[in-house]
Image (cartoon, grey):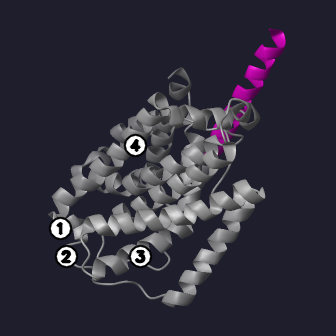
Amino acid sequence: MKRLTNSPAAFGLVALIVITAFAAPGFYSASNLRDLALAIAPVLVAAIGMTLVILLGEIDISIGAQYAVCAILVGLTAKSGAPVILVALAAMGAGAVLGLVNGVLVAQFRIPSIVVTLAAMMALRDMLRWTTQGAWIQNLPTSFQWAGLGQTGGSILIAAVALSVFAAFVWALKNLRAGRIVYAVGCSPESARLAGINPKAVLIAVFAISGMLVGLAAVLGSLRFTDIQSGAGVGLEMKVIAAVVVGGASIAGGRASLWGTLLGVVLMLTIGTSLTYLGIEAFWEKAVQGAIILAAVIANALSGSEKRLVAVVR
């Protein structure tokens, strides 16, 4: 908890809250907070999976393309008349398969994850471009929009699902043996292997879980709209990776916190809107985000140096 409160995400979020509270109180209007929550929900779900991947010292830059594939599948199954629960299961299953393929290639063939997922991103984007010809899936049925609950009920459902998934994974990482195994493999795959754990199986499972969560994120992101773009999810991977790193995760693996990821997601997704309310040009959003990411990387590096120094002194 001490590390969390000292993280760049926590400092940045507190500063953002204080500044907007005094300079732009309209930022806290009910409609704006609702829109922010709806934008945050799918990114948070995808970021949970990315946190697990980064915890193992890996990376997945194909999740934006996975999101697009799952979103197109969501649109097609929704237009076929399938109920929302079956649409969600289909998208989550497709995402799990895409993540599983990445995991197998990384674990079994020892190909660097950045190479595998870069190739997957390009292949999936080109496949979508060829199959859809850039066409959107339009006029989704009203039974699918907002899960048939109307805007208010649907908004509550989207937020509730995202928070429930977050709470479930926080609990699992802390209380289940599977959660402790993920941390063990992230800290030292060789030590985990000597303890009877199969690091390859863990890595494959984590990539599959991450893909499944991307599929769920695609459902939550699609429920709000009547159309689905063939290019959905562009830039999602950068938002998610940045949020996880800003939340205190180590790219080298072995250290990550879902609470930190939550702070990172909220911070990174509210910067743009807050700048608008503060009357600052939108192009400054990337600059501010970059500065926060740089601060997080430096903080992580300094933290690692301090730990090594303590170890030497002892």
Q: Circle 2 sits on which residue?
A: 142
Query: Disc 1 marks which amino acid?
Result: Gly
**Do the CB atoms of the residues marked 1 and 2 lie less than 8 Å apart?**
yes
> Residue at image x 47%, y 68%?
94
Question: Which labelled disc corresponds to residue 148?
Answer: 1
**Do the CB atoms of the residues marked 3 and 4 lie less than 8 Å apart?**
no
Query: Disc 2 marks which amino acid?
Result: Thr
Q: Disc 2 to disc 3, how far (Cα)?
A: 17 Å
Q: Circle 4 sits on which residue?
A: 166
Q: Main secondary structure of the magenta part?
A: helix
Give the image location of residue 42, x and y in percent: 40, 57
Give the image location of residue 18, x and y in percent: 40, 34
Extent of the magenta region: 292-314
Q: Disc 4 to disc 1, how far (Cα)?
A: 24 Å
**Do the CB atoms of the residues marked 2 and 3 lie less than 8 Å apart?**
no
Element type at mark 4: helix
Q: Is residue 128 above or below residue 260?
A: below
Going from the N terminus, do you reach mark 1 or mark 3 first? 3
Any part of residue 143 in sight: yes
Q: Is residue 275 magenta?
A: no
Along the horizontal axis of the image, is 202 left or right of 23?
Answer: right
> Residue at image x 61%, y 82%?
126
Going from the N terminus, do you reach mark 4 or mark 1 first? 1
Q: Circle 3 sits on which residue?
A: 73
